[in-house]
Image (cartoon, helix red, strand yellow):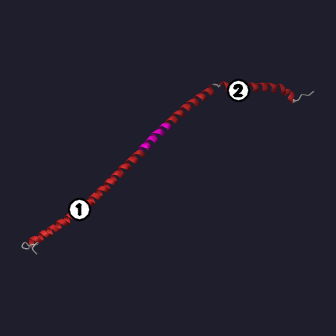
């Protein structure tokens, strides 16, 4: 009788199947036990996680400082605006005072000019009596 190739390979295939199953179990065991490579990978991830936490903390700290600085700048802008408004109102008040003083000065100058004119006219006509006319 002739044997087919399947019959010859059947025992060999069975042996290879056993080896395959053993390799698969070993691979599963390696995944479950967490070998040194996986341990190093986990440590690297933990270190990376710590680094990420540090970066996050730095980012939050930078954000908080930036927010504080922006708030301070906004406060200074409002404070400066209030002071500028006060100075502007004082300047307007002083401008009104100066205009009033100019008006009073003009009135005084007109009065003095009229007084001088009258004084000159009195000097020119010393014999003439104003009340006698």
Residue 115 spot, x, y in % from top left:
15, 67
The quadrant of the image that shows the N terminus is top right
Mark 1 vs mark 2, CA separation in Å: 107 Å
The residue singled out by tag 1 in the image is 104
Pick whichever of labels 1 and 2 is earlier in the sequence. 2
Helix, strand or loop: magenta stretch = helix
The quadrant where residue 103 appears:
bottom left
SS at mark 2?
A: helix
State left or right for residue 13 relative to residue 69. Answer: right
Rendering coords of residue 75 (x, y %): 41, 45
Residue shown at 30% from the left, 56% from the top: 93
Q: How many marks?
A: 2
Question: Which-is-in-front pick, marks 1 and 2?
Answer: 1
- Residue 118 against residue 97 in the figure, above or below: below
Q: Crowding near pointer 2: few (<14 within 10 Å), some, many (20+)?
A: few
Quick one: 104 or 41, which is closer to the camera?
104
The residue under the point 27% across, 57% down is 97
Asked if residue 6 lies left or right of residue 68, the reply is right
> How far from the left and from the top, in percent, is residue 8?
85, 27
Which is more toward the observer, 77 or 61? 77
Instruction: Give residue 44's position: percent from left, percent from top.
Output: 58, 30
Relative vertical location of residue 81 with respect to residue 32 in this rendering, above or below: below
> Would you say residue 129 sits in the magenta stretch?
no
Please indicate whether residue 113 sits to the left or right of residue 124 in the image: right
The structure residue drawn at horizontal position 79% and vertical position 26%, both measured from the top left corner, is: 17
**What stretch of residues is rendered in magenta?**
59-73
Nearer to the camera, 34 or 57: 57
Neighbor class of circle 1 (other Cα within 10 Å; few <14, some 14-19, many 20+) is: few
Q: Residue furthest bottom?
A: 133
Say which mark, if any, is on residue 28. 2
Secondary structure under the numbered disc 1 in the rendered image:
helix
| 85 lies above or below 107 | above
């Amino acid at each position: 009788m002739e044997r087919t190739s399947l019959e010859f390979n059947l025992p060999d295939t069975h042996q290879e199947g056993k080896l395959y199953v053993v390799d698969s179990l070993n691979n599963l065991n390696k995944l479950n036990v967490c070998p040194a490579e996986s341990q190093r990978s986990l440590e690297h991830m933990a270190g990376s996680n710590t680094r990420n936490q540090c970066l996050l903390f730095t980012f939050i700290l930078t954000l908080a400082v930036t927010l504080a600085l922006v708030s301070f700048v906004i406060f200074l802008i409002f404070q400066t605006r209030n002071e500028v408004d006060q100075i502007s109102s004082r300047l307007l008040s002083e401008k009104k005072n100066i205009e009033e003083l100019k008006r009073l000065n003009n009135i005084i100058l007109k009065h003095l000019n009229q007084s001088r004119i009258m004084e000159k006219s009195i000097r020119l006509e010393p014999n003439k009596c104003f009340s006698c006319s």
